[in-house]
């Protein structure tokens, strides 16, 4: 039973999703070694795959949060923030250029 648990933990930690072939092999091994039905084996495999996906998502979320904290500590901005600022500057430049061209010439020389 410990071997099965060990495989499940390694699978959950090491893979986001099992390949179809590896999943089938695990089900067959569980059927022969532990006398479980294929349905039970598939249900177990589905739970393990879901655990792996959840673990991967949580790891990605934690990593993203840590990167954001590091960027903040270094005083750097994210790509999204940079692009927003760039769009804002372009809009202001266009507005300023429009304002200059719409003024009468005597006011420009003024």
Image: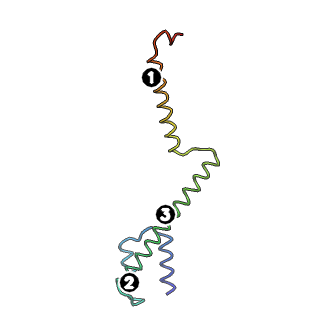
Work out whether mark 2 precedes mark 3 in sequence or the reverse, and give the earlier one: 2
Query: Which residue is denoted by mark 1 in the rendering?
Result: 98
Establish if 104 lies above or below 19.
above
Counting every numbered tag in the picture gives 3
* Distance of label 2 from label 3 (alpha carbons): 26 Å
Secondary structure type for disc 2 = helix
* Distance of label 2 from label 1 (alpha carbons): 70 Å
Residue at 42% of width from left, 80% of height from top? 44
1 vs 83, nearest the viewer: 83
Query: Which residue is denoted by mark 3 in the rendering?
Result: 57
State the image quarter where residue 42 is shown. Answer: bottom left
Q: Residues within 10 Å of mark 3 (few under 14, many from 20)?
A: few
110 vs 65, nearest the viewer: 110
Secondary structure type for disc 3 = helix
Q: Nearer the viewer, mark 2 or mark 1?
A: 1
Q: Are the two marked residues, 1 and 3, in contact with CB atoms closer than 8 angstroms?
A: no
Residue at 51% of width from left, 32% of height from top? 89
Question: What quarter of the picture does the C terminus occupy?
Answer: top right
Residue 39 in the image: state x and y as whole percent.
35, 83
Query: Which residue is denoted by mark 2 in the rendering?
Result: 40
């Amino acid at each position: 039973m410990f071997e099965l648990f060990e495989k499940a933990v390694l699978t959950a930690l090491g893979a986001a999703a099992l390949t179809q072939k590896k999943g089938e092999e695990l089900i067959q091994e569980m059927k022969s070694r532990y006398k479980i039905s294929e349905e039970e084996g598939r249900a177990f495999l589905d739970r393990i795959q879901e655990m792996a996906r959840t673990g991967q998502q949580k790891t990605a979320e934690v990593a993203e949060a840590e990167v954001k904290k590091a960027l903040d500590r270094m005083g750097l901005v994210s790509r999204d923030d940079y692009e927003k600022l760039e769009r804002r500057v372009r809009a202001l430049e266009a507005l300023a250029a429009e304002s200059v061209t719409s003024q009468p010439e005597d006011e420009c020389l003024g």
